Amino acid sequence: MKKSILMLVITTILTIQGYGQNQCDIRDHYEDFISIEKATYNENDYLIKRVIETKGKSCFSQLVNNNTVFIDYLLTNFSSNANYQSLLNQTDSMDLRNSYFEDLKRDSMFNSVMTEFVSKTIEKKAEKDTLAMDDLLNIAVKYFSILRVTDEGHYAGKVCVGLNDIKKTEIDRKPFVEAFCFSSILKHYQSEEFSMYEEFVKSIKELYKVNLGIDKDEKLLRAQGAMFLLMRNNENLKKMLKAEYERQKDIMPFLLTEE
């Protein structure tokens, strides 16, 4: 009798836990970890959208709090900006907030990305994609951008969430791979363990060893291509990506293979 009661209790607990996980709809909780506000700079208004740590406890709170830069990348690059001007015209901060989140809950692209993220990590309903290191490096190198060639012939480079060469080189976008690569590079941009800034600077210095052109536009294009290849063969970048994946693999929606 006691054994039967014990089995019933365990079954009930598992059922409740399973039900809770199945009800983990992150779309209903965007307001818990996304903030929006209007700011002014040089007399021009603009919107600031950020992913912040959630203080509440939910099925996705750990996922969000361990991946704020990752999710911020998804918000920046895979949500619609069609309503930007109408939001900017809002004069009341509460009206701005309400309008923004109403639109975000209807944003099919962002909702698709976020529900897939949860499905492959928290809920484990969907199978994770398999990715080779070559595929990871192909995306990672695109964040080391040569933006322009100065009048003095110097290369101006930058690592940026918005100013990168992903859109110009990738027909099929991979949101989670992009977010992982960018957040990992940013985390270790000036870290003691892996300084991506130093690797970037060393690669830029390598560019000066070859005359890449007289015309500035042609020189810029060749320099960017050369930068991709230099970073593609950068062992420190590869080690960093491997190490960061090992740290985060349980909450990443893809599997990294050794090939």
Image (tube, rainbow, N blue to C red):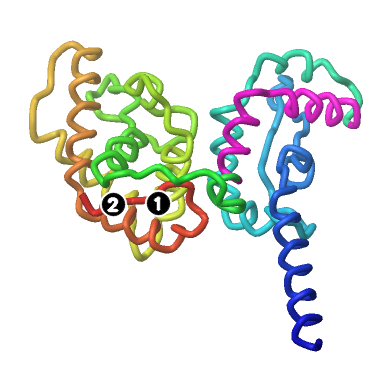
Tag 1 residue: 189
- Amino acid beneath label 1: Tyr
Q: In the structure shown, which secondary structural element does the residue marked by tag 2 occupy?
A: loop
Across and down, in percent, residue 210 comes to: 8, 30
Q: What stretch is highlighted in magenta?
A: 94-118
Against 25, is 16 above or below?
A: below
Q: Which residue is drawn at 25% across and 13% down?
A: 217
Q: 19 or 259: nearer the eye?
A: 19
Separation of marks 1 and 2 at Cα, in angstroms: 24 Å
Examine the image and state in which quarter residue 86 appears.
top right
What is the total number of numbered labels drawn onto the structure image? 2
Q: Which residue is drawn at 56% across and 51% down?
A: 124
Against 203, is 85 above or below?
A: above
- Amino acid beneath label 2: Thr
Across and down, in percent, residue 59 comes to: 71, 56
Tag 2 residue: 257
Any magenta on residue 168? no
Mark 1: few/some/many CA within 10 Å (<14, 14-19, 20+): some
Q: Residue furthest bottom?
A: 2
Q: Quadrant of the N terminus?
A: bottom right
Q: Residue at x 39, y 58 (%)?
A: 244
Question: Could you tell whether 32 is left or right of 199 in the image?
Answer: right
Q: In the structure shown, which secondary structural element does the residue marked by tag 1 occupy?
A: loop
Across and down, in percent, residue 5 comes to: 81, 81
Of labels 1 and 2, earlier in sequence is: 1
